[in-house]
Structure formats: structure tokens, C-alpha cells
Amino acid sequence: MPLILAIESSCDETSVAILSEKKILSNIVLSQIEIHQRYGGVVPEIAARHHLKNLPPIYKEAVKQADIDVSKIDAVAVTTGPGLMGALLVGISFAKGLAVSLRKPLIGVNHLLGHVYAAHLSYADLTPPYLALLVSGGHTELLIFEGPLQPKLLGRTLDDAAGEAFDKVARLLNIGYPGGPAIEKISKDGDPHRYSFPKAMLEKDNFNFSFSGLKTSVLYLLQKQKNLSVCDVAASFQEAVVDVLVEKAANALQTTGLRKLVVSGGVASNTRLREKLSQKTEEMGIELYIPPRSLCTDNAAMIARAAFEMFNAGVSSPLSVTADPALSF
Ligand code: KG4
Ligand code: ZN
């Protein structure tokens, strides 16, 4: 049973996980949100410095919780991109040191593949083919997985990612960072149909996304009308994003004929999105796979699970592997 240790440090979460075959033995996640909150977003230099400080104790804690002998680890996995250059380099250097000292293979993992594999951690019976909707802070993509590792890109955002739109609109509304959870929270007291915001590119054969017009139209509304209900604006904005994501995924399922939908990334923890996706997929007779919230946002267990698949396929990385902030499929 392969034992994989994985490191994730692509943005503002420092995480180390240990996976035995497909079972999580430990998954320690330390979020830096409180540190970056006062700046209204992630400051790359500060993120890298905190990864450097926090990785050694988190590694120790992960090993302790998993209760393993580190010499039994079969491979060391690490996120190589996409993400922040400095933050990625800290994780990669740590992973290389570990791989060399343990004399074990190093596996560089695409962070986006990790997000998709979070679903495999939660659903042991999930197998391709499936459609994946990846909705994170930096990416909004529709991917076709015909086999385990090399998806085909069906569509992606042409400007802001869905998570980025949540973060930017939360800043306009002055309700804090990160924007997704803040908007979700105040939307509970708002009317999702109070304002009608634009839903871009909903044509049936277009699988790309665009969220910057939606963000701008929130800005115009705020400039034009004073004394608006912030909760109504947030709820209406959230509804527009959710409707676009659900409709695009449904169109893609219809066009491709795929019968399974995987949804992952930070935005997949949004309750309204989860509700509307469940409703739509049930109507269509599609099987829906969404990881629990704790595995939707960044964590090393998902990186370990993707690495396990790579390990089985005989894929590893040379010690010269480095960070690729713009890594894609
Ligand atoms: O996947 P993730 O943790 O990091 C990246 O790889 O980017 O995603 C972070 C993004 C942020 O933009 C955050 O605002 C968004 O996910 N997010 C949410 C929610 N929780 C996190 N968006 C909407 N609703 C949420 N509950
Ligand atoms: Zn992520």
C-alpha cells in the first residue's frame, strides 16, 4: 500500500498530508487568512515567509498524527503550480530536501489536478469518464476526464475566475476577505432576485466564462444608488454566478453526453451552488460528486491523492523540477 507524503503551499494555506493508498492518515492545514486580511488580499512575499516558518512544524505534526515511520514513505509529492512563485518555491525546496534525504521519488503535482482529486478522496467509487467543473480563486474551468490524468480543456474563464469575482465584489461591498464566505454569509439575509445582474456567454455551444462584466455592473449599481441593501446586492450577485456555473455545466453535460459531474475548488464550498447543482443534476439524472467543504479549499490531501494516481502510473519528477506559476493542463 503506497504511502505518500504531500506538501501544498501554492497560495495562503500551508499544508502537509500523509495518505496510505487512498486513505487520509493526516491532513494538517494552516491558513494565513488572518495575516492577509488586513491587506484585503494575499501578499505574496508575506505568504512565502510564513510557509517557510510553518512548514517544518506542520510536517512534524502530520507525521505524528499519521503515526508512521518516515522511512516507509514511498514518494514525496508537492504542488509545482499554478500559484505564487515564492510560495511554491518554499514547498518545492522542502519536498526536494525530504525526497533526497529519504531517497524516495519526487512527484510534482498540478494544483488543479489536486482539486479534482479531492472528489476521489470522498467518493471511492468515482471513476472517469466525467466532466469536472473547477472553481477556485484563480481558475474557472470545464474539463473532460476520459482517463485519470490528462483532461481535455472544454472551456475556461476569459477574465476573472468565479472566486476572484467573489473576492472583488466583497471588496466593493466592504465586507472583508476572502470574499466567498463573506458574501455567502450575508446573502442568507438578502433577496437573490432583487437585482438582475448580467449572465455572460450563456449560448449553448460556448463553454468559456466571463465574470468581469458582472463585477463591473455591481460597481455601477453601487455608484448609482446610495443606501442599497448590501445583503440584497450580495445575494443577487451570488445568484448570478451560481446560475452561470450551473447552466454552463448542464450544457457541457448535454453536449458531451457525460453522466458524471465533479465540482471542486474553493467556490464549490458555496451552499447555494451546492443546492442548485444537486437540484439540476437530479433533474438530469446525472451523478454529482462534490467533496466536503474542508477538501474543497486548498489542502495537501488532495495533492497526495493526485500523486497516488501518478505514482501508480509510474510518473515522477526530476530533482530539477521547479515552480510554474502559470501551470495549466
Ligand atoms: O481553491 P481555493 O481555496 O484556492 C485557490 O486555489 O484559488 O479557492 C479560494 C477561492 C477564493 O476566491 C474564495 O473567495 C472562494 O474560493 N471561496 C468561496 C467560498 N469559500 C471560498 N466562494 C464562494 N462561496 C464560498 N463559500
Ligand atoms: Zn486551490
Image (spheres, helix red, strand yellow):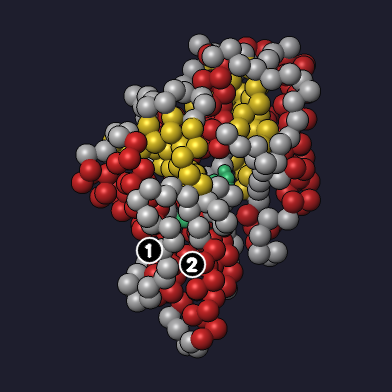
Q: Quadrant of residue 320?
A: top right
**Could you classify mark 1 by the number of other residues whose Cα lies within 10 Å: few (under 14), some (14-19), or many (20 or more)?**
many
Q: Quadrant of residue 133?
A: top left
The extreme bottom residue here reads 226
Answer above or below: position of 22 versus 132: above
Residue 69 image offset from top left, x and y in percent: 63, 15
Q: Nearer the viewer, residue 202 or 69?
A: 202
Judge from the rendering whether residue 75 lies leftward or rightward of residue 319; answer left or right: left
Judge from the rendering whether residue 211 lies leftward or rightward of residue 125; answer left or right: right
Judge from the rendering whether residue 294 lies leftward or rightward of residue 111; answer left or right: left
Residue at x-position 65% and y-position 48%: 12
**Residue, disc 1:** 239
Residue 196 image offset from top left, x and y in percent: 37, 73
Whether label 1 lies within 8 Å of ligand 1 gets the answer no
Residue at x-position 59% and y-position 40%: 29
**Could you classify mark 2 by the number of other residues whose Cα lies within 10 Å: few (under 14), some (14-19), or many (20 or more)?**
some
Q: Is residue 287 visible?
A: yes
Residue 153 image offset from top left, x and y in percent: 50, 37
How far apart marks 1 and 2 lie (CA) works out to 11 Å
Say what amino acid the circle numbered 2 marks.
Answer: Leu
Residue at x-position 73% and y-position 18%: 318
Foreground: disc 1 or disc 2? 2
**Residue, disc 2:** 214
Q: Nearer the viewer, residue 172 or 63?
A: 172
Q: Quadrant of the C terminus?
A: top right
Under circle 2, the secondary element is helix
Answer above or below: position of 167 versus 263: below
Looking at the rendering, the quadrant in which ligand 2 lies is: top right
Say what amino acid the circle numbered 1 marks.
Answer: Glu
